[in-house]
Image (cartoon, rainbow, N blue to C red):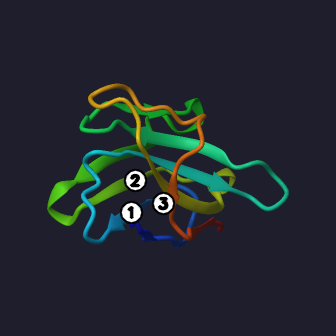
């Protein structure tokens, strides 16, 4: 069974950076589309970025384009989310999720992902 574990969250000042990692044990992530989502209490969960199955094709929502970068770390069987120029509006619990999507195709965020991690808190505050 695919189990995902996020790491790398924390407290950072505005303008700072964090590297989130989504790792899995035993099950290779290459064949899954991986998405990063974030949720703030009282608000709907928001898809932030994804990377395609067996692919390096990526997608970002407008508010993070140019600041966030999603990538695969095949040596560690992980997918990273490098977050730069963070602002307080980025504060949320960040979850990674895996989904079976079209191999080599673009990833899709607005579907029900099959497997979810527990989440990691990101707080951007002076």
Q: Which residue is mark 1?
A: 22
Using the rendered image of the protein, determine whether residue 87 is visible from the camera's viewpoint.
no
| Residue toward you, 62 or 124 | 62
Q: Which residue is mark 3?
A: 16
Q: Which residue is mark 2?
A: 81
- The residue carrying pointer 1 sits among few (fewer than 14), some (14 to 19) or many (20 or more) residues within 10 Å by Cα, namely many
100 vs 83: above or below: above
Using the rendered image of the protein, determine whether residue 31 is visible from the camera's viewpoint.
yes
110 vs 99: above or below: above
Residue furthest to the left in view is 75
Report the quarter where the N terminus lies.
bottom left
Query: What is the x, y in percent for residue 57?
Result: 31, 30
Query: What is the x, y in percent for residue 110?
Result: 60, 34
Q: Residue at x 59, y 36 (%)?
A: 111
Instruction: First in sequence, mark 2 or 3: give its number.
Output: 3
**SS at badge 1:** strand
How many numbered marks does the figure carry?
3
- The residue carrying pointer 3 sits among few (fewer than 14), some (14 to 19) or many (20 or more) residues within 10 Å by Cα, namely some
Residue 41 shown left or right of residue 98 in the figure: right
Residue furthest to the right in view is 42
Question: Residues at badges 1 and 2 in contact (C-beta under 8 Å)?
Answer: yes
Q: Residue at x 51, y 66 (%)?
A: 117
Question: Residues at badges 2 and 3 in contact (C-beta under 8 Å)?
Answer: no
Q: Disc 1 versus disc 2: distance between alpha carbons?
A: 8 Å
Q: Disc 3 versus disc 1: distance between alpha carbons?
A: 20 Å
Question: Residues at badges 3 and 1 in contact (C-beta under 8 Å)?
Answer: no
The residue mark sitting in front, 3 or 1, is: 1
Q: Residue at x 65, y 68 (%)?
A: 126
| Residue toward you, 93 or 54 | 54
Q: Residue at x 51, y 51 (%)?
A: 114
Residue furthest to the top in view is 105
């Amino acid at each position: 069974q695919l189990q995902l574990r996020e790491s790398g969250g924390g407290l950072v000042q505005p303008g700072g950076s964090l590297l989130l990692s989504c790792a899995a044990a035993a099950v290779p992530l290459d064949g899954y589309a991986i998405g990063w989502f974030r949720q703030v209490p009282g608000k709907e969960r928001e898809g932030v970025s994804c990377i395609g199955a067996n692919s390096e094709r990526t997608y970002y929502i407008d508010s993070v384009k140019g600041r966030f970068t999603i990538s695969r770390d095949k040596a560690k069987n992980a997918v990273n989310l490098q977050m730069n120029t963070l602002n307080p509006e980025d504060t949320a619990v960040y979850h990674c999720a895996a989904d079976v999507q079209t191999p080599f195709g673009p990833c899709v965020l607005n579907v029900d992902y099959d497997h979810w991690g527990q989440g990691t808190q990101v707080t951007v505050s002076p």
